[in-house]
Amino acid sequence: MFTRIIKTEWRNLFAEKSFLILAVFFAAVLVYGIYNTSSWIAQKSAENQNLIEKQEKDIAEKKEQVAKGYKGSTEPGNYVPDPSDPYTIGMGLYNAVLPFAPSAVFSLGQSDVLESNAGVSVATLQRTKADKKGFENPLSFLAGHFDLSFVMVYLLPLFILALSFNVLSGERENGILQILLSQPLKLKNLLTAKITAQFSLIFLLVLLAVLGGFLISGISLSAEGFWAKAFLWTVVVFAYMLFWFSLAVFINSYGYSSATNAVAAAAVWLILVLVLPSLLNILVSVIYPVPPRTETISAIRGVNLDMRRDGKKLLAEHYQDHPELMPKEGEKAFEDFGLAFVHIQREQKKRVVEVEERFAEQVANQQNLVQKLGLISPSVIAQEAFNEIAGTGLNRYRHFRLQVKEFDRQWTDFFLPRIYKMDSLTAKDFESIPRFEYEEESFSTIGSRVGIGVLILLIMSGVLMFLSFGKLKNYRLE
């Protein structure tokens, strides 16, 4: 009987033109979301790759010049820095790039506002290419990019509720429910069979549409770790869909009319998907406000040192504290304008890093609070899980920034002693210049964070189904 009801429900759904139109539209939206996401990722990845190739080419050219003994040019109007001077590269900007994960297509997350590269230099840590060329269209940040996670978090619940809001009330109003229950069939079994039929159909539609979107967009399905993340994404989608179907069952269990059910479903969707996350965002920002950008500017301006006036004194104090860095021509170093500039830049960097650490601490506090309070909102749980799987959330970015911080230390340890000692770089030294390579978090770490959200969704669904079956005992058939 259970299987027969499922097959009957499938036939009824395919017989409705409205369902077919809605299903085709939803599948097309899914495919477009994937295509739009993959196009944006491809564009940003190409920019990052060009950045890496450009700086590697620049280092290789300087190495070749040093090997040939080229010392630059001091001619007026044709000045070329000495490539063997560690100041030339160390005080320049090396971009540490955060590559997109192979699973980034599942969600753009916050990758459109979190820079995928960080500038590292002896002088500063915070410069990025965005500081030079500016951000993209502000309207993109205001409206957000249309991606796969937007479709899954916002539109999928609407599709589910539009299909199941009258799963019982519609049968009762058509007079079919009483006929079905006149047979040896319990109401909860009938409801479970109908919901199972709808759930399986939409779940299969989502999987097929997403797979089709991958093929159309030309996404590499053989990348390392892609299918493991895809499986994790499927689990999250399953749990998220189960919650919304359980909510539909809960609404139907009250025995109201289809019109009342539709209004109730729309109101609940509005509260859980739009209102609650917005209130959560405001609450988090009030409890843990981040330092304004003016603090960074004030930190830089707070180092009110004149390089010409105080340079000799500053360098003398520095070399007194670090005699191992004293160059052979000590008196000449005290008069060196460039060394004074380096020293003052280092002081500014210390102040900026202090502000950055407070900023990072507040962002971490915000993220922790979101993870705790967000458990009351299924849409926040799903969005955070999709971002984790795609590698476009704050956790992966914070992991990247920690590695950048360590790389900055390596970069400084390599160049700063050579700058202070006024040593020249050899061709062999260029082979030892640090290079940044991002190390991914383990799959188990990501899976554990996603698993907590999935567990909460399953618990929510179980509670709703338990309450619904309890109310079905008093369901009015009239």
Image (cartoon, grey):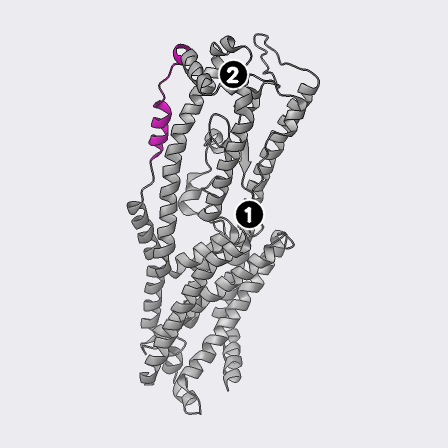
Farthest-out residue, right: 68
- Secondary element type, mark 2: loop
Number of the label disc, if any, that sits on residue 116: none
Is 266 in front, or is 464?
464
The residue to which callout 2 is attached is 326
Q: Residues within 10 Å of mark 2 (few under 14, many from 20)?
A: some
User: Is residue 279 in the magenta section?
Assistant: no
Q: Which residues are magenta?
A: 292-310
Q: Please indicate, yes or no, whether residue 61 appears anywhere in the rendered image.
A: no
**Toward which corner of the image does residue 353 lie, by quadrant?**
top left
Q: Residue at x 35, y 52 (%)?
A: 369
**Toward which corner of the image does residue 31 lie, by quadrant?**
bottom right
Q: Residue at x 35, y 69 (%)?
A: 262
Q: Is residue 444 above or below residue 15?
A: above
Q: Which numbered disc flags the more N-terminal residue, 2 or 1?
A: 2
The residue to which callout 1 is attached is 440
Q: Residues within 10 Å of mark 1 (few under 14, many from 20)?
A: few
Main SS, magenta residues:
helix
Return the x and y of residue 317 as percentages of the image width and height: 42, 16
Return the x and y of residue 478 as percentages of the image width and height: 32, 85
Residue type for callout 1: Glu
Is 191 in front, or is 53?
53
The tally of labels here is 2
The reply to whether dot 2 and dot 1 touch (C-beta < 8 Å) is no
Q: Please indicate, yes or no, whether residue 147 appears anywhere in the rendered image.
A: yes
Gap in angstroms between the C-alphas marked 2 and 1: 40 Å
User: Is residue 296 in the magenta section?
Assistant: yes
Q: Is residue 457 left or right of residue 325?
A: left
Q: Which mark's residue is nearer the viewer, 2 or 1?
A: 2
